[in-house]
Amino acid sequence: MSSHRCVLAGALALGLSACNADAPGSDGALVPEGEAVAVCNDFRADPKVLASMRAGDIALRMALASGAKPDPVAEAASAIARGDFRLAAATTPVGVSLDLYNAQCRLLGSPAAWSIRALAFVPDLAAAEGRGADVPATAFGRQYNAALMADPHYPYRDICRPVSDVGPEPEIRPEEPISQPYGFADLQSGEAVDTMGYAARHNAVDQLRRLVAARPQDIDKPDMFGLTPLAWAIAYQRWRTADVLIEAGASPTGASCQTAIDRQSPLQVARLMRWTDMIGRLRSYVSEEEFANLRQNPRYDDASLADFNRAFFQIKHRYDPILRQRSFSRYELQFTIDEGGNSTSCELVPASNSPEFDAELCEVAMKVVRWTPARDAFATTVPGDAKLVFGLGK
């Protein structure tokens, strides 16, 4: 397994760091034109469309700030007509909040910037919730979202719902088994939406076959959340619709501009769901290199690394007269991490000119730095190697 590494440069030792090897980074009516979209089949790849959406959002924020009273129901109807299904949200110091405007989407992580209409920046979310409908943007946002989600053409009502209907969103922890991090499979209502994503999520085989036959070019088209129909079928653990899509040629790596390691790709969703059988089903449709790239190296915990950085400076200060007898060089703390995320060995490579420094540094590192264990391509925790890289010397 490849090592987890990051190079930290500087005139003297500047502390320790590492690089997380995270796997990176529409069912609507929008049909933008342009070469980027022709290649990616994704409206988010067209700068003109994104610029138009941004300009509309800015105009709406300015209208609210000026004291004007735009009609939220009319605005929602206009958005639906042009295929813009983004919910109103507030941005905060810690991310995006849909809850302030009485909406909640069950997705992996916070909604991406392109999937929401930001109406306001809220420095203190608790205070903003207390003021509620007294704030023009809040009153507008709540009515806008209610109208958008109630519209029969809204294609994500099984993913996004009013907060009052769904209760708290479950906390998602990648290191734990997950049963249903996406959508509200048990909270369906109204008529089915005629999109591949909806059909895939709800095991509607006949509907899905009809849609695939009518628009085969859209089989790998990502929706507003970046997921293709196959990714949604896997997120909802729908064997039947997943088979329909795979047999029709749907890509396990997602849209044409996605890769196997992207968070929204069908393979990554299968890994998140710990669906080993589905990962095995998809394996033959990707290269060995793509499959191998799904492996994840151990990841350090940010807070524990910060604690270790402080300890490192203290240890280095005590040994500095000895360490400075050598020219500046690059060093690696090399760890072996077991499947539980525990350090089982540590070695400084190359060794410094102070065996005592090497031993003390490793002893502290093994006690302080916490790790999320490595996972193989099937998302099973396995032993792995990790590195912290730094410089020492004069």
Image (tube, rainbow, N blue to C red):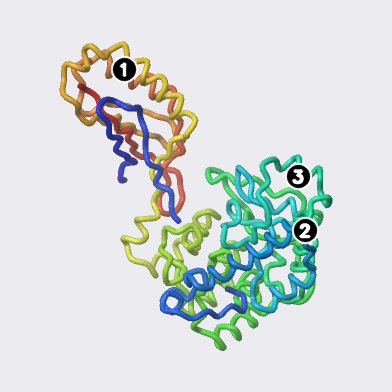
Kindly report the distance in space between the C-alpha atoms of the residues bearing marks 2 and 3: 18 Å
Relative image position of residue 165 (x, y in whole percent): 80, 57
**Residue 350 numbered tag:** none
Q: On the image, which quarter does residue 232 sit in?
A: bottom right
**Residue furthest out toward the bottom:** 214
Q: Above or below — where is 41 with respect to 214?
A: above
Q: Which residue is mark 1?
A: 316
- Using a 10 Å C-alpha cutoff, classify the residue at mark 1 as few (fewer than 14 neighbours), some (14 to 19) or many (20 or more): some
Q: Which dot marks residue 128?
A: 3
Residue 235: image quadrant is bottom right
- Mark closest to the chain's N terminus, 2 or 1: 2
Please name the amino acid that badge 3 sits on. Ala
Residue 329 place in picture, x, y as percent: 19, 28
In the image, farthest residue toward the right: 134
> For the residues carrying marks 2 and 1, which lies nearer the camera in this image?
2
Residue sitting farthest toward the front: 66
What percent of the width, then of the height, locates residue 283?
40, 64
Specify the amino acid type for callout 1: Lys
